[in-house]
Image: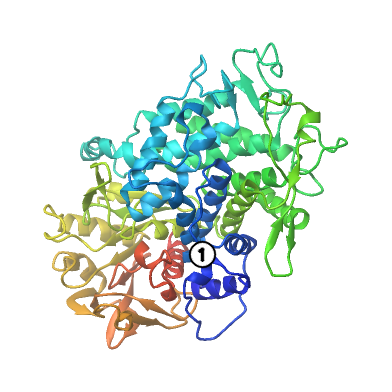
Amino acid sequence: MRLTNLLAATLLLCHAPCALAQIAAPQPAAPTTPLLTPAQKMAATVLQQHPATTPAPCTWGYEDGVRLDGMVAEWHTTANPAIFHFIQSTVDPCIAADGSIAGYKPDTHTLDNIEMGRAVLFLYRVTSQPKYALAARFLHDQLDLQPRTPSGGYWHKQIYPNQMWLDGAYMAEPFRAEYDATFLEPQFEKEILDRVNSGVDNVITHTIAAPDFDDIAKQLLLMDAHMRDPKTGLLRHGWDESKQMPWADKQTGLSPEVWARAMGWYCMALVDVLDWFPKDHPQRAALIAALNRTMAAVVKVQDAKTGLWWQVMTRDSEPGNYPEASASCMFTYALAKGVRMGYLPQADEANAKRAWEGIQKQFITTNPDGTLTLHGTVKVGGLGGTPYRAGDFNYYIHEPIVDQDKKGVGAFLLAGSEMEQSVTESLGQGKIALIDAWFNSQTRKNAFGQTELFHYKWDDDSPSGYSLFGRAFQSYGVSLATLPTAPTAAALARANIYVIASPDILIKNPNPHYMDQPSGDAIEAWVRAGGVLLLFSNDRDSTEFTHFNTLSDRFGIHFNPVLSHHVVGEDHSTGEVVIPPNTGIFGAGFTAFMKDTCSITVSGPARAVVTDHGDIMIAISHLGKGVVLAVTDPWVYNEYADGRKLRQYDGLEAAQDLAAWAVRQSK
């Protein structure tokens, strides 16, 4: 759905003051009545029910954190600027300029209070504001002080000694993994490059693991080893290693029952940790195996009639038991994402779809104002404490059931974001989209002074990055990789799609790497064999032309070192480029934005795809079994794709269309 239509449709739900109403939405040229997905409707509901019209007090906790996780997932798939504003306006009241967190009590040592750090990291990665980095480091440092069981597992809280709860897997480990990938792994960049240069690696699909990843795996695998019921394959809610708690089995230390949401936390933790876990880490395979064991057991107890899961998972339809909403959403998310990312078998997608249908039927109602209500979420579940919770069947079925619970809504949004991608996820399975980090190898310092690659990179979430473009490929099940060396036949052999954007010049990189004949020969041979090559240039003052054209000229495409579509100040109209319908690449005609571009001259096998004001802006060329697409601007980088700036130009949808086309062309 084009973003302009999404914004217009979202506004239809905002009869009351709405966060989105604070942002002037562009009017589509031809008003339509677009259909929103269930997750988009729920995101709009959250915006309407919690308008960011006045400064809000800090509400720091895992429930808000899970709802923010869901909103982040929806922002990634829609680039709705009101969603980003909601996330930031929820976090900002809690974070001071020095990174301190309002009301945070370190001495409680509760993993629950780590979870909202994921939203903090998200905001840092997008905005680069130091306060978010400082707050994230504070939370990471708290984990260094977290008490541990004799086996090395985190206590769930200070008041629950020697106890691991499945809840803690989601509360801590995805945050740790993302933090480590953001701030600890840049320390290992030289080792990465040394490995590549010595021939150990041809393509970076990973980074050298910071030692913290060993412990992340340890936490999750301790649960896998000690909390799994060998009869059902499901995991119990809690494990008291001391075996002192009244609820703990005296032989195993396990709690009596399999609580659905506890299982849901663990499943989501596994799929989310793997997003950041190094591809070559020795424990990655063990985590994927644990995910497969866990989801196979979950699928076995999926209710045959409704597609949902019971509050107490092994008690089926015993009197008092009931299908529970938040857990059903969590399992849907873990199944669908696990399949899309290639961790789980494709057959599991059918189980996710059946569950999603059941969730809509049993738990969702539409209100008179168009908003949604999610019913059927159990308010809480715990073990021990005061008043005492026995963790038995009778306890779990008597906890209150509530509507529109934050963690339930968050899980619904997470599941919905995956189901939005489920229609395409199988099309690119097994394929790799490779981003260049040699011809454009610019670096910057992060908030803690560490050197990191940036500018048109898959893992760069800032305005200069291609992270949303990368996510578009991932929505088709494509894996992402980075090439930090000159391309060779061996390096390209694993790739189906290769992206080179805006090669460096001296003013941007004091040590630029220029296109040369061996690189051009390798790329040309790879294209002839069936590769899909995407070339993004830039304006005359921002990129290198002479050497780059020695590659593009091989395909009849020549980038002209001119300044076209020059934008001065806020007059964005000079950067508008009309994309006509029926290009074979883009789903429909629309107006794009390309600021300060070059132009293209075509010859031989190349032809123009998009021409604007006499300039060829996009060209295509076929060679052998492969194809080359050239664009006069980096275009689909986050600044113009994430919806926060010039959202009327459909940058995200352009990235999605380009990714879809490249996947279709790839062999």
Q: Is residue 222 above or below residue 653?
A: above
Please give the name of the residue rendered at 26% of the width and 70% of the height, measured from the top-left corner.
555
Residue 262 appears anywhere in the view: yes
Q: Is residue 185 left or right of residue 590?
A: left
Relative to residue 266, is residue 563 drawn left or right?
left
Q: Nearer the viewer, residue 487 or 508?
A: 508
Q: For the C terminus, which image quadrant?
A: bottom left
Say which quadrant the N terminus sits in: bottom right
Q: Residue at x 32, y 59 (%)?
A: 499
Farthest residue, direction bottom: 613
Res 637 → quadrant: bottom left
Image coordinates of residue 82 in percent, x first then y, are 49, 65
Looking at the image, is 411 positioned above or below residue 537?
Answer: above
Residue 144, horizontal then vertical, whole percent: 40, 26
Instruction: Determine crowd level at label 1: few under 14, some 14-19, many 20+ residues with C-alpha closer than 10 A.
Output: few
Left or right of residue 309: residue 200: left
**Amino acid type, callout 1:** Thr
Q: Is residue 514 above or below residue 248?
A: below
Secondary structure at numbered mark 1: loop
The x and y percentages for residue 125 are 37, 50
Q: Identify residue for label 1.
A: 53
Quarter of the figure with residue 367: bottom right
Tell me which corner region of the image, top left, top right, bottom left or bottom right, holds residue 553: bottom left
* Residue 288 visible to an observer of this rendering: no
Q: Position of residue 101 (x, y in %)?
A: 42, 41
